[in-house]
Image (cartoon, rainbow, N blue to C red):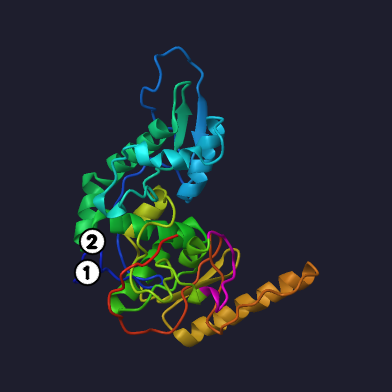
Amino acid sequence: MQMNTPPRSTIRLTRRGKLVLVVTCAVVAGTAVAVPLLNLTSGGDTKPRTLVIPEGWRASQVYDAVDKVLALPAGSTLKSLGKAGLKLPSDAEGNPEGYLFPATYPVRDKATPQSLLQYMVDTANQRFNGAPLAAGAQRNAMNVYQAVTIASIVQAEAASKDDMGKVARVIFNRLARGMPLQMDSTINYALNRNTLTTSTDDTRVESPYNSYQRMGLPPTPIDNPGEQAMRATINPPPGDWLYFVTVKPGDTRFTADYAEHERNVAEFNEQQRTRASQQNQSPQQSQSPQQSGTSQQSGSSQGEPSPAQEPWTPRSST
């Protein structure tokens, strides 16, 4: 599916639009899979500890987990990045987000932050650069790094594994139409949070990860996607969907009709008000008629179609 997609520096994605990814990962649905660890020790210890990296974790969560498993002061792994020598794609510009492959890693006595991070990245490169992924990316006029970025959004936005393919299709459809992605998950990443609601003020945040204001893909992946998100991205089902919202658990609604989407959003807001009332809390409602919930548990594609904008050069990052 050729889309005349520009190079990564100028590619534009819409809120949940259009791109495809190919990947052969070793993560089982919802669980990390054990992978053989590189030789980090001379062989004295036979019962290693383990480090579990779940699908969808952000790099910051991985750094904290490495600090904890190695009993290091908080922030040690983050500080070690400069000397880790990670073999990342040039597009990553040294940021390993998206390439800290989700798996269960044995941790030997002589393991270091650098050795653990390098093995995660090496594992990701082995999975992502194989023929299926590379061919799938090329088939959809994008590189592997762009494909991983899309899969990270799919991972964050889909309310269930069954929804992942449809979310990927929404992304591709929006890209094809020159619409902004308008993904709440990218706002959450920009603000370093996870939440079901996004306010109008949130959508105005100055960040290259603000997919309401910026056209195309965010500058990096927003988490470390798992195998199913990758597979969904490289082979999404056919459909004309442009919007979606998870009204309640198990009820994600996809549509190509904006008026129908607004009705779904209104129902989502009513569900939120009812839940808040039952918990004797103030109702949390969206502050714009298009707003709907997202993040790790629900997804939404919001806003009316808008024309493609000029390429935007990131001025900051989060």
- Kind of residue sitting beneath label 1: Thr
Instruction: Measure the alpha-carbon separation of dots 1 and 2.
Output: 7 Å
Front-most of 8 and 240?
A: 8
The reply to whether discs 1 and 2 touch (Cβ–Cβ < 8 Å) is: yes
- Kind of residue sitting beneath label 2: Met
| Residue at the extreme top | 44
Residue 168 percent across, percent down from the top left: 38, 64
| Residue at the extreme bottom | 259
Q: Secondary structure at mark 2?
A: loop
Reading the image, the residue beneath label 2 is 142
Reading the image, the residue beneath label 1 is 5
The first of marks 1 and 2 along the sequence is 1
Residue 158 percent across, percent down from the top left: 48, 61
Magenta part of the protein: which range? 192-202
Front-most of 309 and 49?
A: 309
Name the residue located 31 percent from the left edge and 80 percent from the top edge.
309
Q: Is residue 46 visible?
A: yes
Q: Is residue 39 above or below residue 210?
A: above
Q: Quadrant of the N terminus?
A: bottom left
